[in-house]
Image (spheres, coloured by chain):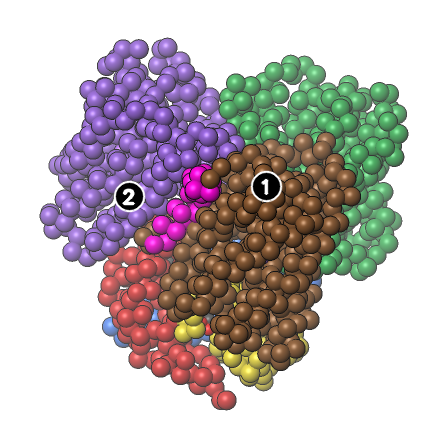
Chain colours: A blue, B red, C yellow, D green, E purple, F brown
Amino acid sequence: MELTTVKLVTIIAEAVLEERILHDLRQLGARGYTIGEVRGSGTRGIHASEWEGKNLRIETLVGPEVAEQILQHLANNYFPYFAVIAYATDVQVMRGTKFRG
Amino acid sequence: MELTTVKLVTIIAEAVLEERILHDLRQLGARGYTIGEVRGSGTRGIHASEWEGKNLRIETLVGPEVAEQILQHLANNYFPYFAVIAYATDVQVMRGTKFRG
Amino acid sequence: MELTTVKLVTIIAEAVLEERILHDLRQLGARGYTIGEVRGSGTRGIHASEWEGKNLRIETLVGPEVAEQILQHLANNYFPYFAVIAYATDVQVMRGTKFRG
Amino acid sequence: MAIVELVQINLLSPMVLAFALGIVATLVHSDLKLPDELYTTLSIYLLLAIGLKGGIALSQTSLAAFWAPAIATLALGLIIPVIAYTVARRLGRLSIADAAALAAHYGSVSAVTFAASQTFLDTVGVRYEGFMPALVAILEVPAIVIALLIAQMAGGQQDGDWREALRELVTSKSILLLVGGMIIGWLAGPHGGKEVAPLFVDLFKGALTFFLLELGMVAARRFRDLPSAGWFLLGFAIMMPVFNGFLGVWFGSMAGLSLGGSTILGVLAASASYIAAPAAVRIALPQANPGFYLTAALGITFPFNLALGLPLYYTLATWIIGS
Amino acid sequence: MAIVELVQINLLSPMVLAFALGIVATLVHSDLKLPDELYTTLSIYLLLAIGLKGGIALSQTSLAAFWAPAIATLALGLIIPVIAYTVARRLGRLSIADAAALAAHYGSVSAVTFAASQTFLDTVGVRYEGFMPALVAILEVPAIVIALLIAQMAGGQQDGDWREALRELVTSKSILLLVGGMIIGWLAGPHGGKEVAPLFVDLFKGALTFFLLELGMVAARRFRDLPSAGWFLLGFAIMMPVFNGFLGVWFGSMAGLSLGGSTILGVLAASASYIAAPAAVRIALPQANPGFYLTAALGITFPFNLALGLPLYYTLATWIIGS
Amino acid sequence: MAIVELVQINLLSPMVLAFALGIVATLVHSDLKLPDELYTTLSIYLLLAIGLKGGIALSQTSLAAFWAPAIATLALGLIIPVIAYTVARRLGRLSIADAAALAAHYGSVSAVTFAASQTFLDTVGVRYEGFMPALVAILEVPAIVIALLIAQMAGGQQDGDWREALRELVTSKSILLLVGGMIIGWLAGPHGGKEVAPLFVDLFKGALTFFLLELGMVAARRFRDLPSAGWFLLGFAIMMPVFNGFLGVWFGSMAGLSLGGSTILGVLAASASYIAAPAAVRIALPQANPGFYLTAALGITFPFNLALGLPLYYTLATWIIGS
Ligand SMILES: Nc1ncnc2c1ncn2[C@@H]1O[C@H](COP(=O)(O)O)[C@@H](O)[C@H]1O
Ligand SMILES: Nc1ncnc2c1ncn2[C@@H]1O[C@H](COP(=O)(O)O)[C@@H](O)[C@H]1O
Ligand SMILES: Nc1ncnc2c1ncn2[C@@H]1O[C@H](COP(=O)(O)O)[C@@H](O)[C@H]1O
Ligand code: NA
Ligand code: NA
Ligand code: NA
């Protein structure tokens, strides 16, 4: 088996958004996700999650086009009002088809 | 000190596999690891860990050959039956020798 | 909006260092950070955090120069005595200015 | 008792002192940090315990006396948000979203303030109706809905997802645990209740003390936003509860509630939600500034009610009803 | 008492009602979520408390009466998995791995079902031997080992790491806490026991209630797999416990256990493991489908035993032994 | 009572047995693992409960008898680290940093060992002054400061950030909860105390048992470092507590403490910190090897004090004071 390259998209978002973001990811074609609980701070002030103490770190492995769409979607629908950031990077996996589809 | 490039291998696996995977990583030449608790879902259905609510996110910094071997090993021994995914990416570190050996 | 590339610096450090490292990151020009709790082991023996069971995984998105400085700073001030590792990688983001400054 | 005396009794209760300790811990930058999981566990425990006790009480008390207070409570849930919104818009010149957000928080209710009021009355030795937790459940949701509708009509929130917000409201854990706990208590009755009393009754005040230690730290973290909040918010976060508290006591007395019951309804009206409301508002009114409504509800109103509000609303009740 | 009456008593206990509330929470997609750490803490607490109480009881009761029940229990642990495997293979036409996995789960035991049965008998007012927790420990492991051996011999699991699985079994936290707790209780005796009773005895039923709230949510999440599970699994997950329950009560009565003791041994035999077995099976029989054995043990058998099984096995015992 | 008898009583207490169970769990590589959040919660609970009980006691006892013991305790906090440092340097030939680190740990105090000593005396039926928790607070910080100063002067730690370390020391959660709890207990008094007693008093010993289960696992993990630690550390970790224990009992008796009070002061002096000290030392003396001081304090001294120290220091006290 040789390695293929897919995109790893990482999203840091306040916890209240979990369901909505996961729903959007499915819509945009992500086949799976991994969530970890984190905390942090950035340029924005406090956000509702803060006093509940949690942000979420959502990772999803997808093909390059889907990755692009996810970042676009987040920038349009979440960046304006929510404490959300996202970034993408290339990673090598076995069986890229599982994620690229 | 200047930067050298090593491989960061990330493994998402159900919690019951912790000991076995860490053992395998040592065997394959990894000098250390970092574990975070996560949850998630993918193409496979439920897995034993699910109702215990946890997956593990295991990261290890290694040289390129070792990285290749780890991915191969996981693909052969875990992918068939276990809820496990893994991916590798290049990262820059100081003192690559600590990880490359 | 098109994608720009910034550096993602990841630091694994024992929990007692949280305040000091975050302070240093601000000094060096980081605009934000994300922290997750992890555990792990490496070449060094035990460290104070171990029996408290926690390491921290600190991520910060910064410009390339700042990233370089952070890694240098950590190598000089923490590597000698503390259980700390750090690595940097390129990631694509929307609105790089938020992080690059 | 004179109000000074009541305030003193209240301030020297372990719960209020633990809240103060939490504030101190944050101000001196102590490394004290309660695990988030403990916070979640305690809030689940408190809501369930409140419901259980209420349900057991309901299983013994006739509901004849229940309808009037229920309607009075519902009325409060409809009126208060409208008043709060108008005040915030007219006097405070706040944006539609910020005003509606405040209306949602002050119209809804804080279960912990409710629990503290029960403990306060127990200490003072004043009895109250057993079905009060049912009123908490009744008061929690409507005000939030009203506030979101107002914002909706005022056209201030095309970005929010308010259907989603409503669905989450009625299935929110606070409602589920309160109502669920009441049903369990009502079905299990005093006998079944006795089996779980050591956990859900005997430990209640201790758990509340622990929880307030954490809330003190949370509230103190909001303090640093006070300067940026401005005078209006400060005034609003103190005057609004007092006004609502008076309204609650008054409605309660008219609905035939006892002295203790009217006091508690006053406390419910005066309290500002910080569990159900923030989550709902965050999703339905994202453009509302959390630094604004959280600071008001958690940073000012909650401490005020806990320290001075409880004795104050009780005194109001003694005036209106006469003890 | 008539069985209907017993069922009613059982269904109206806070524990069963909390389980139901957990199911509802999941079905209405509530945001209620107990922290995993609370779940872990409660399971550790329950196992340790069960062991402690058993150990203290052991320190007072003569062991003369213990051997016969111990052997009867061991026999159950050897027989049940063989029967379960055969049924699953012959009637269910399941793969070797899936059949062996079911055998491991139904041969082993659920400590929480055991705890619920004690509470049930306490409520009904039936006494039972103090050494029952020892039987839980005896019944937990053997069946899992047998099931893995069967799979091994049938050549169904060259991929699994069954030595590792065995090692982990005997050092598993449930065994360690049960046996460890018993030894502590046995050594500390009633006097030492009294010191920790407020935590490990008085709070037990409350903690169990809390735990069942979580288990209700877990079980309900398994419901969505029911359709795909098919009729055989549904039948198996209800008939197998009833059969095993009868077997347990029968063996118990023959071993000279009291009415209460025989009832509990019936419950132990009928219950399906969901702590020790899933972990062991996952490692030793990875190709067995967890959606299958978890759905059967957690989604069907556990609720069935909790709601109807307890009164049923008790009634069986009254028939066989006569109350 | 003969010391053998006391040791036996002590070893058979649920707390010590739970500690032993924790050790076993680690040695057999059990999958038992208490959530970190539970560990944190329990340590917060224990510190707060110790403070509360002390504060309530203080609110009733006259402080006249308090000053002498307070000064005696302070003296211990200044003398012990100097002795410990000298021993570690001269006899042990340790580096300045390692010697100072040990001095900080053995000069400071372990709140859990203190709690265990209270439980031990309760079991034996020996009474002690109510203000002992205040002495814990007094003894905790000074020794650490002294040790850091020694290292500073000896020029051993240009790398450390010792101002930061000091700031964190005085605001550390152990000090905050101990002192805060005492103030709360003192202000709320017996009446307010009664309200939270079910949580903070009745459950104390049970919670302590739970905590010691975890500490047993932690201590056992340190065992594997014992070989590399060498003979000096082993001797130091056992002889130093005995010497300090004697010193504590002696100072206590001179300060007019009762038999029980002197015993406890002995325990405080003998105990080695593993909450405040490690954190402070890690930051101020990074070049000190944690495998060294943690192994000594947690892996050797704590188990020694818990198992043998308590009865030993009590016996010393009976000799010096006479029961
Ligand atoms: N596309 C994906 N992106 C991120 N994480 C994934 C993805 N697919 C699977 N995972 C993670 O890997 C675990 C096992 O995946 P699976 O074997 O596909 O069920 C899931 O629980 C997720 O945590
Ligand atoms: N090769 C590695 N890969 C991933 N994480 C590592 C590695 N080496 C060390 N770490 C992490 O860094 C921490 C400190 O490492 P060390 O200073 O080598 O003990 C460990 O506890 C691990 O969490
Ligand atoms: N530069 C950054 N590096 C890493 N994480 C960040 C950065 N900026 C923001 N974040 C994360 O994104 C969340 C929201 O950021 P913000 O909207 O800027 O407040 C913060 O709570 C952080 O967890
Ligand atoms: Na209100
Ligand atoms: Na069984
Ligand atoms: Na000491």
Q: Does F22 lie within the magenta span?
A: yes
Q: Does D259 lie within the magenta span?
A: no
Pointer 1 chain: F
For the point 31% across and 70% down, the residue is B26
What quarter of the picture does the N terminus of chain D occupy? top right
Q: Main secondary structure of the magenta part?
A: helix
Residue count near mark 1 (Cα–Cα under 10 Å), binned few <14, some 14–19, many ≥20: few
Q: Which residue is mark 1?
A: F322
The front one of E176 and F149 is F149
The front one of E304 and C26 is C26
For the point 17% across and 42% down, the residue is E146
Q: Residue E277 got which mark?
A: 2
C9 sits to left or right of E88: right
Element carrying mark 2: helix
Which residues, given as a range, are shown in magenta?
A: F3-27
> Is residue A94 shown to the viewer in this render?
no
User: Compared with residue D256, is residue D219 higher up or lower down, i.e. above or below?
Assistant: below
Looking at the picture, which amino acid does disc 2 mark? Ala
Q: Residue E260 got which mark?
A: none
Nearer to us of marks 1 and 2 is 1
